């Protein structure tokens, strides 16, 4: 698409580090601003799909965990606890702006099984036609190694393809893609536009995610490959201030834009 202003169907992925404080508890001010901006974009006529992280992080805080446990059963229990609180917040906050949300929890077999894929696609289309905002997360409670996406960056890319979105925006705690790892190179510069993900770009990306989340820059590049190969543009931007979404749709230079290359 490339003309970001004209993007109508938008998938917006928001990461754990954006949604929560270091304590793991929800950053209420950020979440409220995020919802307010999305509600306004919806009022402009945009179709909004949210891919949200944060369930395990919020669950950790609620259950008194200082760090993410290694045991899968504990992670799944924390996801169940945190997902309830996340959806409660989204539902109440969007209701203030007269918008309705719907929870969609996915596992990887939805992408791999043709019948499930079609069913999921139909559900998304029905919700969007009803002017509902789908709120998507991985179904961590039942996911196994064979069924999990592994991170919500990848999940958001598959959701973009599934819904034939015009644009995928990944909001994280980084300003964009750098020409080299900024943790080790203070002179690193943001790359404004990427039309091809080369080995050199992957090499400079680094790999670590945050303690509260699962994704690093490598997972975002994977997401970019999935989306752009299907002709979907993708932006990585810093979600610390959700008002940045206005900058994106005002055409201001924001974060890193990955240009869709394939046919939608």
Image (cartoon, rainbow, N blue to C red):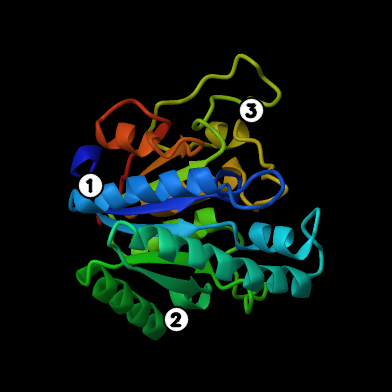
Q: Which residue is mark 2?
A: 113
The answer to whether the residues at label 2 and label 3 have Cβ atoms under 8 Å apart is no
- The residue at 45%/52% (across/down) is 13
| Distance between mark 3 and mark 1 Cα atoms | 30 Å
Image disc number at residue 125: none
Where's residue 7, x and y in %? 23, 47
Q: Nearer the viewer, residue 257 or 172?
A: 172
Element at label 3 = loop
Task: Kindly indicate the quadrant of the structure image that contains residue 49.
Answer: bottom left
Q: Quadrant of the C terminus?
A: bottom left
Q: Is residue 48 left or right of residue 201?
A: left
Q: Which residue is mark 3?
A: 181
Name which of mark 2 and mark 3 comes first in the sequence: 2
Name which of mark 3 and mark 1 comes first in the sequence: 1
Element at label 2 = loop
Q: Nearer the viewer, mark 1 or mark 2?
A: 1
Q: Nearer the viewer, residue 36 or 221?
A: 36
Q: Nearer the viewer, mark 3 or mark 1?
A: 1
């Amino acid at each position: 698409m490339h003309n970001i202003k004209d993007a109508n169907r938008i998938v917006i992925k928001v990461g754990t580090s954006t949604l929560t404080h270091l304590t793991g508890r929800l950053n209420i001010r950020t979440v409220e601003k995020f919802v307010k901006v999305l509600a306004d974009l919806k009022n402009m006529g945009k179709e909004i799909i949210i891919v949200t992280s944060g369930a395990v992080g919020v669950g950790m805080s609620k259950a008194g965990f200082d760090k993410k446990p290694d045991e899968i059963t504990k992670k799944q229990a924390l996801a169940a606890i945190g997902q309830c609180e996340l959806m409660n917040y989204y539902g109440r906050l969007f209701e203030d702006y007269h918008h309705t949300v719907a929870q969609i929890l996915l596992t990887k077999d939805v992408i791999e099984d043709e019948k499930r894929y079609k069913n999921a696609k139909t559900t998304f289309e029905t919700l969007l036609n009803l002017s509902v905002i789908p709120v998507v997360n991985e179904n961590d409670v039942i996911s196994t190694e064979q069924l999990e996406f592994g991170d919500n960056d990848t999940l958001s890319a598959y959701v973009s393809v599934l819904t034939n979105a015009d644009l995928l925006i990944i909001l994280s705690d980084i300003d964009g893609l750098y020409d080299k790892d900024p943790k080790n190179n203070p002179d690193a510069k943001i790359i404004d536009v990427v039309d091809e993900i080369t080995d050199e770009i992957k090499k400079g990306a680094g790999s670590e995610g945050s303690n509260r989340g699962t994704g690093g820059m490598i997972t975002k590049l994977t997401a970019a490959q999935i989306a752009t190969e299907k002709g979907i543009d993708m932006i990585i931007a810093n979600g610390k201030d959700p008002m940045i979404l206005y900058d994106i749709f005002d055409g201001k230079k924001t974060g890193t834009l990955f240009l869709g290359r394939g046919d939608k």
